Protein backbone atom coordinates (compact mmCIF):
# COMPACT_ATOMS: atom_id res chain seq x y z
CA UNK A 1 0.00 0.00 0.00
CA UNK A 2 1.09 3.59 -0.62
CA UNK A 3 0.53 4.68 2.99
CA UNK A 4 2.75 3.62 5.91
CA UNK A 5 0.41 2.32 8.62
CA UNK A 6 2.50 3.02 11.71
CA UNK A 7 0.73 2.01 14.96
CA UNK A 8 0.17 4.64 17.63
CA UNK A 9 1.73 3.79 20.99
CA UNK A 10 -0.29 2.14 23.73
CA UNK A 11 0.21 3.62 27.20
CA UNK A 12 -1.21 1.91 30.28
CA UNK A 13 -4.00 4.21 31.58
CA UNK A 14 -3.94 5.43 35.19
CA UNK A 15 -7.31 3.78 35.90
CA UNK A 16 -5.62 0.37 35.97
CA UNK A 17 -3.88 1.18 39.26
CA UNK A 18 -6.14 3.73 40.96
CA UNK A 19 -9.54 5.36 40.47
CA UNK A 20 -9.51 8.32 38.10
CA UNK A 21 -11.26 11.59 38.81
CA UNK A 22 -14.43 12.15 36.80
CA UNK A 23 -13.78 13.46 33.29
CA UNK A 24 -15.95 16.16 31.67
CA UNK A 25 -16.23 14.19 28.41
CA UNK A 26 -15.27 10.71 27.25
CA UNK A 27 -15.32 10.18 23.48
CA UNK A 28 -15.51 6.63 22.17
CA UNK A 29 -13.90 6.30 18.75
CA UNK A 30 -10.74 7.90 17.33
CA UNK A 31 -11.85 8.22 13.73
CA UNK A 32 -12.20 11.64 12.07
CA UNK A 33 -15.41 12.43 13.97
CA UNK A 34 -14.21 11.49 17.47
CA UNK A 35 -10.87 13.23 17.00
CA UNK A 36 -12.48 16.38 15.61
CA UNK A 37 -14.86 16.38 18.60
CA UNK A 38 -11.97 16.24 21.05
CA UNK A 39 -10.09 19.06 19.31
CA UNK A 40 -13.20 21.23 19.09
CA UNK A 41 -13.81 20.84 22.83
CA UNK A 42 -10.15 21.40 23.65
CA UNK A 43 -10.12 24.70 21.79
CA UNK A 44 -12.92 25.78 24.14
CA UNK A 45 -11.04 24.63 27.23
CA UNK A 46 -12.93 21.35 27.75
CA UNK A 47 -10.90 18.27 28.65
CA UNK A 48 -11.74 14.89 27.14
CA UNK A 49 -10.54 11.31 27.03
CA UNK A 50 -10.64 9.56 23.63
CA UNK A 51 -10.91 5.76 23.76
CA UNK A 52 -10.30 3.56 20.73
CA UNK A 53 -10.03 -0.22 20.48
CA UNK A 54 -7.50 0.09 17.64
CA UNK A 55 -4.06 1.71 17.37
CA UNK A 56 -3.77 2.57 13.68
CA UNK A 57 -5.57 4.82 11.21
CA UNK A 58 -8.31 3.31 9.04
CA UNK A 59 -7.07 0.87 6.41
CA UNK A 60 -7.94 1.84 2.84
CA UNK A 61 -8.84 5.32 1.67
CA UNK A 62 -12.52 5.04 2.75
CA UNK A 63 -13.97 8.55 2.96
CA UNK A 64 -12.14 10.75 0.47
CA UNK A 65 -14.34 13.71 -0.54
CA UNK A 66 -14.24 16.66 1.85
CA UNK A 67 -16.58 19.55 1.13
CA UNK A 68 -15.89 23.26 1.40
CA UNK A 69 -17.85 23.69 4.64
CA UNK A 70 -16.05 20.72 6.19
CA UNK A 71 -12.70 22.22 5.22
CA UNK A 72 -13.72 25.48 6.91
CA UNK A 73 -14.44 23.54 10.11
CA UNK A 74 -11.13 21.71 9.81
CA UNK A 75 -9.48 25.11 9.35
CA UNK A 76 -10.89 26.18 12.72
CA UNK A 77 -9.57 22.95 14.25
CA UNK A 78 -6.07 23.59 12.91
CA UNK A 79 -5.72 21.07 10.08
CA UNK A 80 -7.47 22.73 7.12
CA UNK A 81 -4.39 24.17 5.45
CA UNK A 82 -2.53 20.89 5.80
CA UNK A 83 -5.42 18.99 4.22
CA UNK A 84 -5.65 21.49 1.36
CA UNK A 85 -1.90 21.24 0.68
CA UNK A 86 -2.00 17.42 0.49
CA UNK A 87 -5.43 16.94 -1.07
CA UNK A 88 -6.43 16.92 -4.72
CA UNK A 89 -8.57 19.96 -5.44
CA UNK A 90 -11.46 19.58 -7.87
CA UNK A 91 -14.67 21.38 -8.71
CA UNK A 92 -15.65 20.10 -12.18
CA UNK A 93 -17.74 16.99 -12.63
CA UNK A 94 -18.59 15.27 -15.91
CA UNK A 95 -21.47 12.91 -16.59
CA UNK A 96 -21.56 10.31 -19.35
CA UNK A 97 -24.32 8.08 -20.72
CA UNK A 98 -22.68 5.13 -22.38
CA UNK A 99 -19.62 6.59 -24.09
CA UNK A 100 -21.29 9.96 -24.78
CA UNK A 101 -20.69 13.02 -22.57
CA UNK A 102 -23.97 14.40 -21.24
CA UNK A 103 -22.80 17.59 -19.57
CA UNK A 104 -20.32 18.99 -17.05
CA UNK A 105 -20.86 21.16 -13.98
CA UNK A 106 -18.81 23.57 -11.88
CA UNK A 107 -19.43 23.35 -8.13
CA UNK A 108 -17.83 26.70 -7.29
CA UNK A 109 -18.10 29.04 -10.29
CA UNK A 110 -17.54 32.22 -8.22
CA UNK A 111 -14.17 33.36 -6.90
CA UNK A 112 -13.73 34.78 -3.41
CA UNK A 113 -13.57 31.71 -1.15
CA UNK A 114 -10.64 30.53 0.97
CA UNK A 115 -11.38 26.86 0.33
CA UNK A 116 -12.42 25.05 -2.86
CA UNK A 117 -15.70 23.23 -3.39
CA UNK A 118 -14.10 19.86 -2.65
CA UNK A 119 -10.78 18.17 -2.12
CA UNK A 120 -10.09 14.47 -2.31
CA UNK A 121 -7.94 13.18 0.54
CA UNK A 122 -7.81 9.66 1.91
CA UNK A 123 -9.30 9.16 5.37
CA UNK A 124 -6.04 7.80 6.74
CA UNK A 125 -4.34 11.15 6.11
CA UNK A 126 -7.20 13.02 7.76
CA UNK A 127 -6.97 10.78 10.84
CA UNK A 128 -3.19 11.16 10.96
CA UNK A 129 -3.42 14.97 10.84
CA UNK A 130 -6.12 14.99 13.52
CA UNK A 131 -4.13 12.69 15.82
CA UNK A 132 -1.08 14.90 15.44
CA UNK A 133 -3.18 17.99 16.13
CA UNK A 134 -4.67 16.34 19.23
CA UNK A 135 -1.18 15.47 20.45
CA UNK A 136 -0.41 19.19 20.42
CA UNK A 137 -3.05 19.59 23.16
CA UNK A 138 -1.94 16.99 25.76
CA UNK A 139 -3.35 18.88 28.76
CA UNK A 140 -6.83 18.80 27.23
CA UNK A 141 -6.93 15.60 25.15
CA UNK A 142 -6.01 12.19 26.57
CA UNK A 143 -5.69 9.79 23.61
CA UNK A 144 -5.92 6.15 24.67
CA UNK A 145 -5.35 3.54 21.98
CA UNK A 146 -6.14 -0.17 22.52
CA UNK A 147 -8.74 0.88 25.11
CA UNK A 148 -11.92 -0.97 24.20
CA UNK A 149 -15.23 0.09 25.77
CA UNK A 150 -17.14 -3.02 26.83
CA UNK A 151 -20.04 -1.42 28.69
CA UNK A 152 -21.48 1.79 30.09
CA UNK A 153 -24.11 2.82 32.62
CA UNK A 154 -25.90 6.16 32.63
CA UNK A 155 -26.25 7.17 36.28
CA UNK A 156 -28.36 10.24 35.57
CA UNK A 157 -25.75 12.88 36.39
CA UNK A 158 -22.78 11.00 34.90
CA UNK A 159 -21.84 7.87 32.96
CA UNK A 160 -19.73 4.94 34.19
CA UNK A 161 -17.68 3.30 31.43
CA UNK A 162 -16.08 -0.15 31.44
CA UNK A 163 -12.81 -0.36 29.50
CA UNK A 164 -10.63 -3.31 28.48
CA UNK A 165 -6.91 -2.92 27.71
CA UNK A 166 -3.96 -5.28 27.03
CA UNK A 167 -3.09 -4.89 30.73
CA UNK A 168 -6.54 -5.50 32.20
CA UNK A 169 -9.83 -3.68 32.78
CA UNK A 170 -10.78 -0.44 34.52
CA UNK A 171 -13.63 2.03 34.85
CA UNK A 172 -14.02 5.69 33.95
CA UNK A 173 -16.63 8.25 34.95
CA UNK A 174 -17.67 11.10 32.66
CA UNK A 175 -20.15 13.95 32.80
CA UNK A 176 -20.95 13.21 29.13
CA UNK A 177 -20.27 10.22 26.90
CA UNK A 178 -19.94 10.85 23.15
CA UNK A 179 -20.39 7.80 20.91
CA UNK A 180 -18.37 8.20 17.71
CA UNK A 181 -17.65 4.55 16.92
CA UNK A 182 -19.07 4.41 13.41
CA UNK A 183 -21.93 2.62 11.70
CA UNK A 184 -21.70 -0.56 13.81
CA UNK A 185 -21.84 1.49 17.05
CA UNK A 186 -21.63 -0.94 20.02
CA UNK A 187 -23.01 1.84 22.23
CA UNK A 188 -26.16 2.10 20.13
CA UNK A 189 -26.56 -1.68 20.13
CA UNK A 190 -26.05 -1.96 23.91
CA UNK A 191 -28.79 0.62 24.40
CA UNK A 192 -31.04 -1.30 21.98
CA UNK A 193 -31.94 1.90 20.14
CA UNK A 194 -34.01 1.60 16.95
CA UNK A 195 -31.98 2.45 13.86
CA UNK A 196 -34.64 2.74 11.21
CA UNK A 197 -34.05 3.09 7.50
CA UNK A 198 -33.63 1.34 4.17
CA UNK A 199 -31.08 -1.24 3.10
CA UNK A 200 -30.17 -1.16 -0.59
CA UNK A 201 -29.52 -4.56 -2.11
CA UNK A 202 -27.11 -3.52 -4.87
CA UNK A 203 -23.44 -4.30 -4.28
CA UNK A 204 -20.69 -1.87 -5.23
CA UNK A 205 -16.99 -2.46 -5.75
CA UNK A 206 -14.55 0.18 -4.52
CA UNK A 207 -11.03 -0.07 -5.89
CA UNK A 208 -8.12 2.27 -5.27
CA UNK A 209 -5.46 1.95 -7.95
CA UNK A 210 -2.10 3.67 -8.28
CA UNK A 211 -1.41 5.04 -11.77
CA UNK A 212 1.40 7.40 -12.77
CA UNK A 213 -0.45 8.35 -15.96
CA UNK A 214 -3.75 10.20 -15.56
CA UNK A 215 -6.79 8.68 -17.29
CA UNK A 216 -8.40 12.14 -17.53
CA UNK A 217 -8.36 14.08 -20.81
CA UNK A 218 -7.43 17.27 -18.94
CA UNK A 219 -4.61 18.44 -16.69
CA UNK A 220 -7.12 19.27 -13.92
CA UNK A 221 -8.53 16.46 -11.77
CA UNK A 222 -12.27 15.98 -12.21
CA UNK A 223 -15.08 13.69 -11.08
CA UNK A 224 -16.29 11.43 -13.89
CA UNK A 225 -19.51 9.47 -13.55
CA UNK A 226 -20.94 7.06 -16.14
CA UNK A 227 -24.43 5.68 -16.51
CA UNK A 228 -24.23 2.38 -18.45
CA UNK A 229 -20.61 2.79 -19.58
CA UNK A 230 -19.37 0.60 -22.46
CA UNK A 231 -16.73 -0.94 -20.18
CA UNK A 232 -19.28 -1.95 -17.50
CA UNK A 233 -22.49 -2.83 -19.32
CA UNK A 234 -25.79 -1.77 -17.79
CA UNK A 235 -24.32 -0.51 -14.53
CA UNK A 236 -22.75 2.73 -13.25
CA UNK A 237 -19.14 3.78 -12.63
CA UNK A 238 -17.30 6.58 -10.89
CA UNK A 239 -13.69 7.75 -11.25
CA UNK A 240 -11.77 10.47 -9.42
CA UNK A 241 -8.24 11.17 -8.22
CA UNK A 242 -6.65 11.17 -4.76
CA UNK A 243 -3.13 12.16 -3.64
CA UNK A 244 -0.12 9.92 -4.34
CA UNK A 245 -1.48 9.11 -7.84
CA UNK A 246 -4.21 6.97 -6.31
CA UNK A 247 -7.47 6.83 -8.28
CA UNK A 248 -10.81 5.80 -6.79
CA UNK A 249 -12.95 3.62 -9.03
CA UNK A 250 -16.47 2.72 -7.87
CA UNK A 251 -18.42 0.12 -9.87
CA UNK A 252 -22.03 -0.96 -9.43
CA UNK A 253 -22.27 -4.75 -9.38
CA UNK A 254 -25.94 -5.53 -8.82
CA UNK A 255 -27.89 -7.28 -6.04
CA UNK A 256 -26.90 -10.90 -6.80
CA UNK A 257 -23.16 -10.38 -6.50
CA UNK A 258 -21.01 -12.68 -4.37
CA UNK A 259 -18.87 -10.14 -2.43
CA UNK A 260 -16.08 -12.63 -1.66
CA UNK A 261 -15.75 -13.65 -5.28
CA UNK A 262 -15.75 -10.07 -6.57
CA UNK A 263 -13.13 -8.76 -4.12
CA UNK A 264 -10.34 -10.77 -5.72
CA UNK A 265 -7.57 -9.78 -8.13
CA UNK A 266 -8.85 -12.31 -10.65
CA UNK A 267 -12.16 -10.44 -10.88
CA UNK A 268 -10.96 -6.90 -10.27
CA UNK A 269 -7.96 -6.58 -12.61
CA UNK A 270 -9.96 -7.26 -15.82
CA UNK A 271 -12.54 -4.67 -14.71
CA UNK A 272 -9.83 -2.05 -14.22
CA UNK A 273 -8.17 -2.85 -17.55
CA UNK A 274 -11.51 -2.36 -19.27
CA UNK A 275 -11.50 1.22 -17.96
CA UNK A 276 -7.84 2.29 -18.23
CA UNK A 277 -6.69 0.09 -21.11
CA UNK A 278 -2.95 -0.49 -21.25
CA UNK A 279 -2.13 2.15 -18.65
CA UNK A 280 0.04 0.49 -15.97
CA UNK A 281 -1.57 0.36 -12.53
CA UNK A 282 -1.17 -1.20 -9.10
CA UNK A 283 -4.05 -2.28 -6.86
CA UNK A 284 -3.85 -0.41 -3.57
CA UNK A 285 -7.10 -1.41 -1.83
CA UNK A 286 -10.46 -2.90 -2.70
CA UNK A 287 -13.74 -3.70 -1.02
CA UNK A 288 -17.25 -4.82 -1.97
CA UNK A 289 -20.08 -3.29 0.00
CA UNK A 290 -23.77 -2.57 0.14
CA UNK A 291 -25.21 0.13 2.32
CA UNK A 292 -28.06 1.43 4.41
CA UNK A 293 -29.66 4.81 4.85
CA UNK A 294 -30.75 4.96 8.50
CA UNK A 295 -30.74 7.21 11.55
CA UNK A 296 -31.61 7.38 15.22
CA UNK A 297 -34.79 9.23 16.12
CA UNK A 298 -32.89 11.13 18.81
CA UNK A 299 -29.16 11.83 19.04
CA UNK A 300 -29.27 12.80 22.73
CA UNK A 301 -30.04 10.19 25.38
CA UNK A 302 -29.52 11.96 28.69
CA UNK A 303 -25.72 11.87 29.18
CA UNK A 304 -25.02 9.80 26.06
CA UNK A 305 -24.62 11.73 22.80
CA UNK A 306 -24.32 10.21 19.32
CA UNK A 307 -22.30 11.75 16.47
CA UNK A 308 -21.36 10.71 12.94
CA UNK A 309 -22.16 7.22 11.68
CA UNK A 310 -23.11 6.15 15.20
CA UNK A 311 -26.16 8.40 14.76
CA UNK A 312 -26.85 8.16 11.02
CA UNK A 313 -25.61 6.38 7.90
CA UNK A 314 -26.08 7.17 4.22
CA UNK A 315 -24.94 5.83 0.89
CA UNK A 316 -21.52 7.07 -0.26
CA UNK A 317 -23.01 8.90 -3.25
CA UNK A 318 -22.80 12.62 -2.55
CA UNK A 319 -20.05 12.40 0.08
CA UNK A 320 -22.54 12.97 2.89
CA UNK A 321 -21.16 10.55 5.50
CA UNK A 322 -17.91 12.09 6.73
CA UNK A 323 -19.03 15.61 5.87
CA UNK A 324 -22.30 15.13 7.76
CA UNK A 325 -20.39 13.80 10.75
CA UNK A 326 -18.14 16.88 10.86
CA UNK A 327 -21.27 19.04 10.78
CA UNK A 328 -22.45 17.08 13.85
CA UNK A 329 -19.21 18.00 15.61
CA UNK A 330 -19.50 21.64 14.55
CA UNK A 331 -23.04 21.77 15.94
CA UNK A 332 -22.44 19.88 19.18
CA UNK A 333 -19.02 21.18 20.25
CA UNK A 334 -19.94 24.74 21.24
CA UNK A 335 -23.20 23.61 22.84
CA UNK A 336 -21.56 20.95 25.01
CA UNK A 337 -18.83 23.40 26.02
CA UNK A 338 -21.46 26.02 26.95
CA UNK A 339 -23.40 23.51 29.07
CA UNK A 340 -20.28 22.27 30.87
CA UNK A 341 -19.15 25.83 31.64
CA UNK A 342 -22.57 26.80 32.98
CA UNK A 343 -23.10 29.35 30.22
CA UNK A 344 -26.16 27.50 28.90
CA UNK A 345 -28.78 25.09 30.28
CA UNK A 346 -28.48 21.36 29.61
CA UNK A 347 -31.61 21.68 27.47
CA UNK A 348 -29.43 23.35 24.82
CA UNK A 349 -28.23 19.86 23.89
CA UNK A 350 -31.76 19.02 22.75
CA UNK A 351 -31.25 21.52 19.93
CA UNK A 352 -28.28 19.44 18.75
CA UNK A 353 -30.62 16.52 18.23
CA UNK A 354 -33.30 18.72 16.64
CA UNK A 355 -30.93 20.32 14.15
CA UNK A 356 -28.76 17.36 13.25
CA UNK A 357 -31.68 14.93 13.00
CA UNK A 358 -33.02 17.42 10.46
CA UNK A 359 -29.66 17.56 8.68
CA UNK A 360 -29.23 13.79 8.58
CA UNK A 361 -32.80 13.29 7.32
CA UNK A 362 -32.02 15.70 4.49
CA UNK A 363 -28.83 13.79 3.71
CA UNK A 364 -30.68 10.47 3.70
CA UNK A 365 -33.36 11.87 1.39
CA UNK A 366 -30.78 13.11 -1.11
CA UNK A 367 -28.73 9.94 -0.80
CA UNK A 368 -31.76 7.68 -1.34
CA UNK A 369 -32.88 9.68 -4.37
CA UNK A 370 -29.41 9.39 -5.89
CA UNK A 371 -29.33 5.64 -5.34
CA UNK A 372 -32.80 5.17 -6.84
CA UNK A 373 -31.86 7.22 -9.91
CA UNK A 374 -28.63 5.26 -10.36
CA UNK A 375 -30.27 1.87 -9.83
CA UNK A 376 -33.87 1.98 -11.14
CA UNK A 377 -36.08 -0.60 -9.46
CA UNK A 378 -38.84 -0.83 -12.09
CA UNK A 379 -39.06 -0.59 -15.90
CA UNK A 380 -40.84 2.77 -15.54
CA UNK A 381 -38.02 4.16 -13.37
CA UNK A 382 -35.46 2.93 -15.89
CA UNK A 383 -37.43 4.52 -18.76
CA UNK A 384 -37.56 7.85 -16.92
CA UNK A 385 -33.84 7.73 -16.06
CA UNK A 386 -32.78 6.98 -19.64
CA UNK A 387 -35.09 9.63 -21.08
CA UNK A 388 -33.63 12.23 -18.73
CA UNK A 389 -30.09 11.28 -19.74
CA UNK A 390 -30.94 11.47 -23.46
CA UNK A 391 -32.60 14.87 -23.10
CA UNK A 392 -29.82 16.30 -20.95
CA UNK A 393 -27.33 16.29 -23.83
CA UNK A 394 -29.19 19.13 -25.55
CA UNK A 395 -31.82 20.40 -23.07
CA UNK A 396 -30.47 22.15 -19.92
CA UNK A 397 -33.74 21.68 -17.99
CA UNK A 398 -33.21 17.91 -17.92
CA UNK A 399 -29.76 18.24 -16.36
CA UNK A 400 -31.31 19.28 -13.08
CA UNK A 401 -33.09 15.91 -12.94
CA UNK A 402 -29.89 13.85 -13.20
CA UNK A 403 -28.80 12.50 -9.84
CA UNK A 404 -25.43 10.81 -9.51
CA UNK A 405 -25.13 12.02 -5.92
CA UNK A 406 -26.13 15.56 -4.91
CA UNK A 407 -22.85 16.60 -3.34
CA UNK A 408 -22.77 17.52 0.34
CA UNK A 409 -24.00 20.95 1.38
CA UNK A 410 -24.76 22.22 4.91
CA UNK A 411 -28.47 22.24 5.65
CA UNK A 412 -30.46 25.32 6.58
CA UNK A 413 -31.63 25.63 10.21
CA UNK A 414 -34.35 28.15 9.33
CA UNK A 415 -37.34 27.75 11.63
CA UNK A 416 -35.52 25.67 14.23
CA UNK A 417 -35.66 26.54 17.92
CA UNK A 418 -32.48 28.61 18.28
CA UNK A 419 -33.05 30.91 15.30
CA UNK A 420 -34.85 34.29 15.40
CA UNK A 421 -36.83 35.99 12.63
CA UNK A 422 -37.76 35.20 9.03
CA UNK A 423 -34.96 36.84 7.08
CA UNK A 424 -33.98 34.55 4.16
CA UNK A 425 -30.41 34.21 5.48
CA UNK A 426 -31.48 33.07 8.97
CA UNK A 427 -30.44 29.46 9.46
CA UNK A 428 -28.02 29.46 6.54
CA UNK A 429 -24.38 28.50 6.90
CA UNK A 430 -21.99 31.36 6.19
CA UNK A 431 -20.88 31.81 2.61
CA UNK A 432 -17.25 32.87 2.58
CA UNK A 433 -15.97 36.16 1.15
CA UNK A 434 -12.78 38.23 1.29
CA UNK A 435 -12.55 40.47 4.38
CA UNK A 436 -9.54 42.78 4.47
CA UNK A 437 -6.48 40.57 4.24
CA UNK A 438 -8.41 37.48 5.38
CA UNK A 439 -11.67 35.63 4.99
CA UNK A 440 -15.13 36.02 6.49
CA UNK A 441 -15.59 32.46 7.71
CA UNK A 442 -12.25 32.25 9.51
CA UNK A 443 -13.02 35.53 11.33
CA UNK A 444 -16.68 34.84 12.11
CA UNK A 445 -16.82 31.19 13.23
CA UNK A 446 -15.76 29.77 16.59
CA UNK A 447 -17.67 32.23 18.82
CA UNK A 448 -20.88 34.23 18.76
CA UNK A 449 -20.09 37.04 16.32
CA UNK A 450 -22.07 40.06 15.19
CA UNK A 451 -21.17 40.84 11.58
CA UNK A 452 -22.00 44.46 10.72
CA UNK A 453 -21.69 45.50 7.08
CA UNK A 454 -21.83 49.19 6.18
CA UNK A 455 -21.59 52.45 8.11
CA UNK A 456 -23.93 51.43 10.95
CA UNK A 457 -21.72 49.96 13.71
CA UNK A 458 -23.37 47.70 16.27
CA UNK A 459 -23.30 48.24 20.04
CA UNK A 460 -21.05 46.08 22.19
CA UNK A 461 -23.02 43.18 23.69
CA UNK A 462 -21.49 40.92 26.32
CA UNK A 463 -20.75 37.46 24.95
CA UNK A 464 -20.65 38.61 21.31
CA UNK A 465 -17.53 39.29 19.27
CA UNK A 466 -17.98 42.35 16.99
CA UNK A 467 -16.93 42.22 13.34
CA UNK A 468 -17.61 45.57 11.66
CA UNK A 469 -16.81 45.94 7.95
CA UNK A 470 -17.48 49.48 6.76
CA UNK A 471 -15.99 48.98 3.30
CA UNK A 472 -16.98 45.48 2.19
CA UNK A 473 -15.47 43.64 -0.75
CA UNK A 474 -17.67 43.26 -3.83
CA UNK A 475 -18.17 39.57 -2.98
CA UNK A 476 -19.27 40.35 0.58
CA UNK A 477 -21.68 43.03 -0.61
CA UNK A 478 -23.14 40.74 -3.25
CA UNK A 479 -23.63 37.82 -0.84
CA UNK A 480 -24.96 39.75 2.17
CA UNK A 481 -25.67 43.42 1.49
CA UNK A 482 -25.74 45.91 4.36
CA UNK A 483 -27.02 44.99 7.81
CA UNK A 484 -26.21 43.07 10.97
CA UNK A 485 -25.94 39.28 11.25
CA UNK A 486 -25.66 37.30 14.48
CA UNK A 487 -23.53 34.26 13.75
CA UNK A 488 -23.33 31.17 15.96
CA UNK A 489 -19.99 29.51 16.75
CA UNK A 490 -20.76 26.86 14.11
CA UNK A 491 -21.06 29.50 11.38
CA UNK A 492 -24.86 29.45 11.04
CA UNK A 493 -26.66 32.79 10.97
CA UNK A 494 -29.20 32.79 13.79
CA UNK A 495 -30.59 36.34 13.44
CA UNK A 496 -30.50 39.31 11.04
CA UNK A 497 -31.17 42.96 11.88
CA UNK A 498 -31.68 45.97 9.65
CA UNK A 499 -30.57 48.26 12.44
CA UNK A 500 -28.42 47.58 15.48
CA UNK A 501 -30.86 47.37 18.39
CA UNK A 502 -29.15 46.20 21.58
CA UNK A 503 -32.29 44.65 23.07
CA UNK A 504 -33.04 42.67 19.89
CA UNK A 505 -29.47 41.43 19.67
CA UNK A 506 -29.43 40.43 23.36
CA UNK A 507 -32.72 38.58 22.97
CA UNK A 508 -31.49 36.72 19.88
CA UNK A 509 -28.30 35.71 21.71
CA UNK A 510 -30.31 34.36 24.66
CA UNK A 511 -32.48 32.33 22.32
CA UNK A 512 -29.45 30.97 20.46
CA UNK A 513 -28.02 29.76 23.78
CA UNK A 514 -31.25 28.01 24.70
CA UNK A 515 -31.98 30.49 27.48
CA UNK A 516 -35.32 31.66 26.06
CA UNK A 517 -37.71 31.12 23.16
Image (cartoon, helix red, strand yellow):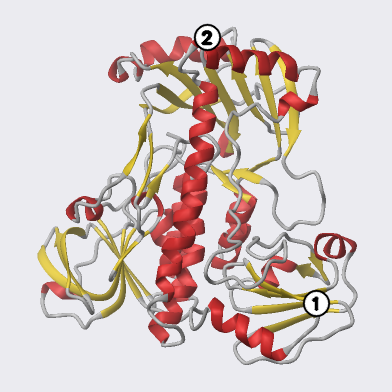
The answer to which of 360 and 233 lies nearer the viewer is 360
In the image, taking residue 217 as reference, residue 201 lies left or right, namely left
Q: Please give the residue where the numbered disc 1 appears in the rendered image.
A: 498
Q: Nearer the viewer, mark 1 or mark 2?
A: 1
* 10 Å crowding of disc 1: few (<14), some (14-19), many (20+): few
Using the rendered view, name the quadrant where residue 483 is placed. bottom right
Q: Say which residue appears at 59% left-offset and 28% top-offset.
A: 404
Mark number displayed over residue 234:
2
Residue 21 screen position, x and y as percent: 21, 83
Residue 54 screen position, x and y as percent: 27, 51
Using the rendered view, name the quadrant where residue 302 is placed. bottom left
Callouts 1 and 2 close, C-beta under 8 Å: no
Residue 84 screen position, x and y as percent: 63, 52
Q: Say which residue appears at 36% left-offset and 28% top-offset.
A: 289
Distance (Cα) linking label 1 and label 2: 55 Å
Residue 111 screen position, x and y as percent: 82, 51
Q: Say which residue appears at 54% left-offset and 18% top-offset.
A: 236
Amino acid sequence: MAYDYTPFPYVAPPGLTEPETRHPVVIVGAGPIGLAMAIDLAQQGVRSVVLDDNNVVSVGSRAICWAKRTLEVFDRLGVGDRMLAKGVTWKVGRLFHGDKPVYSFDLLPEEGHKYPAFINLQQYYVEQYLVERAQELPDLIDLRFLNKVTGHTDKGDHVVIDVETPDGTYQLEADYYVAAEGAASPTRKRMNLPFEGQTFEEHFLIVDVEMQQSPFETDSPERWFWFAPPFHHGQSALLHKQPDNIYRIDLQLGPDTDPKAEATEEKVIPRIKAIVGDTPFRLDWMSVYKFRCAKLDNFVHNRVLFVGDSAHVVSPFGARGGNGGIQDVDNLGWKLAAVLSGDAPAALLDSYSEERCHGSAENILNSSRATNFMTPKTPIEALFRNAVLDLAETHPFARKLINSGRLSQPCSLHGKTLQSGDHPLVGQSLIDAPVGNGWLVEQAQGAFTLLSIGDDAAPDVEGIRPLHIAAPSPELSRRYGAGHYLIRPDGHICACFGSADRDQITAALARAKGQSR
